[in-house]
């Protein structure tokens, strides 16, 4: 009885985590630029300070998490059951583009678009204006009708140059090493 219950539980969980083609393409592109994408409950990291009326939300695990120190993205598996897997990955992809723009630290992209009114409470809860700006951009892109295309374009725009620079540096170091 126990083995069949365990097998059924594993199969049920596997069926819940069934991302669509856009999710997979975006995940692959993030990995191409050196980001590690984890489909797992995000670890306990110190989140930016939020206003007190939002403190109770911090008891729950976030849907997604970008860790700049490890160049990793965590996607909580619950998002697939909720049907918001793409939105969460798009949000974290904007943070990856911000990371590339800042050459290893998050820097605003200074986008020319505004967030929808319903998204404002989600980024205005941050006390620090820098985090508020970063989250504003992520929620703005996430809520656009062309969010997938926009996130992919931002990722390519800001991370492509970092990839090229890294490859050139590695090639230069290799040639320098060869000459020794």
Image (cartoon, helix red, strand yellow):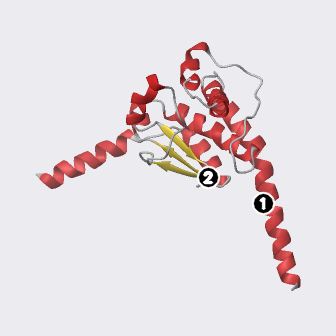
Give the side of residue 131 with respect to residue 58, left or right: right
Decide: few, some or many residues near mark 1? Use Cα within 10 Å; few <14, some 14-19, many ≥20: few
Pinpoint residue 141: horizontal percent, then vertical percent.
Answer: 65, 27
- Residue 145 drawn above or below residue 150: above
- Residue 115 drawn above or below residue 55: above
Q: Which residue is mark 2?
A: 35
Pinpoint residue 110: horizontal percent, then vertical percent.
Answer: 77, 30
Decide: few, some or many residues near mark 2? Use Cα within 10 Å; few <14, some 14-19, many ≥20: many
Q: Determine the residue located farthest toward the bottom in the rendered image.
A: 180
Q: Secondary structure at mark 1?
A: helix
Residue 119 disc label: none
Cα separation between marks 1 and 2: 14 Å
Q: Residue at x 30, y 47 (%)?
A: 11
Give the side of residue 109 with respect to residue 89, left or right: right
Pinpoint residue 39: horizontal percent, then vertical percent.
Answer: 46, 47
Return the residue nearer the eye: 2 or 54: 54
Q: Determine the residue located farthest toward the left in the rendered image.
A: 1
Q: Residue at x 42, y 34 (%)?
A: 58
Q: Determine the residue located farthest toward the right in the rendered image.
A: 179
Pinpoint residue 24: horizontal percent, then vertical percent.
Answer: 55, 44
Return the residue nearer the eye: 61 or 48: 48
N-term-proximal mark, 1 vs 2: 2
Q: Residue at x 80, y 56 (%)?
A: 164
Q: Residue at x 64, y 22 (%)?
A: 144
Q: Quadrant of the C terminus?
A: bottom right
Q: Which residue is mark 1?
A: 166
């Amino acid at each position: 009885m126990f083995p069949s219950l365990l097998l059924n539980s594993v199969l049920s969980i596997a069926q819940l985590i069934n991302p669509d083609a856009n999710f997979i393409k975006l995940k692959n592109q993030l990995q191409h630029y050196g980001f590690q994408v984890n489909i797992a409950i995000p670890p306990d990291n110190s989140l930016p300070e939020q206003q007190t009326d939002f403190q109770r939300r911090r008891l729950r695990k976030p849907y997604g998490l970008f860790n700049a120190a490890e160049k990793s993205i965590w996607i909580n598996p619950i998002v697939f059951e909720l049907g918001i897997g793409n939105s969460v990955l798009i949000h974290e992809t904007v943070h990856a583009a911000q990371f590339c723009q800042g050459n290893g630290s998050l820097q605003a992209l200074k986008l020319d678009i505004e967030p929808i009114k319903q998204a404002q409470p989600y980024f205005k809860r941050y006390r620090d204006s820098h985090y508020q700006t970063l989250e504003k951009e992520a929620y703005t892109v996430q809520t656009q009708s062309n969010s997938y295309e926009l996130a992919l374009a931002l990722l390519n725009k800001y991370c492509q140059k970092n990839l090229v620079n890294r490859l050139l540096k590695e090639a230069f170091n290799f040639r320098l090493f060869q000459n020794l």
